Image: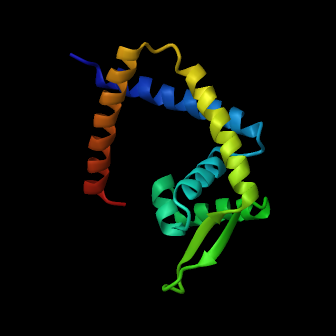
Amino acid sequence: MCDKELLYNLIKETFLLLDDGDRRFFRRFDLTVSRYYALHHIGEDPGISFSLLSDRMVCDKSNVTRIIKGLEDAGYVTRHPHETDGRTLRLYLTDAGTAVYQQVARAHQQYNETRLSCLHEIEHETLVEGLTRLNEHMRAELALIGS
């Protein structure tokens, strides 16, 4: 029988190690983890709203506003009014934002290749399957609990 507490602690430790590695990595590009993932989501979905970005980043709208303000100050992001809903703003990367996002995304992909290289293909596939199932289950649990 699997010890759920041990499993939880291993997953938590893995998260902390990944997060600390990301913080150190993104610092080299003068970015925080949150700013990088905001660039990522805006780059993958140009015109994304603050609300949807908040959902994708799993943080509240006031945090997203602060993150976007910093990215605007850096010249990486612009806000434009929604075409039909005057209360909604759409977010876009500037040319400088696109350039930095592409550079950092390539470097981050290489970094992940290195730090996950200890996993053999079968271990990788099994871990992906298990974590995907776990994440789906936890999303469903969170939906039942509400905010």
Q: Is residue 134 above or below residue 122?
A: below
Identified at 63% across, 27% down, the residue is 111
Q: Quadrant of the C terminus?
A: bottom left
**Front one among 63 and 72:** 72
The quadrant in which residue 126 appears is: top left
The quadrant in which residue 23 appears is: top right
Q: Looking at the image, what colour scheme do you see?
A: rainbow
Q: Is residue 138 above or below residue 19?
A: below
Identified at 55% across, 68% down, the residue is 47
Residue 113 in view, yes or no: yes
Query: Residue 109 at what x, y percent from top left?
Result: 59, 32
Query: Residue 7 at what x, y percent from top left?
Result: 35, 23
Q: Is residue 109 above or below residue 82?
A: above
Asked whether, in this view, residue 130 is left or right of residue 27, the answer is left
Residue 58 in view, yes or no: no
**Front one among 136 and 61:** 136
Identified at 60% across, 61% down, the residue is 63
Query: Residue 145 at what x, y percent from top left?
Result: 28, 55
Q: How many marks?
A: 0
Identified at 65% across, 51% down, the residue is 35
Query: Residue 136 at what x, y percent from top left?
Result: 29, 43
**Front one among 46 and 27:** 46
Q: Quadrant of the N terminus?
A: top left
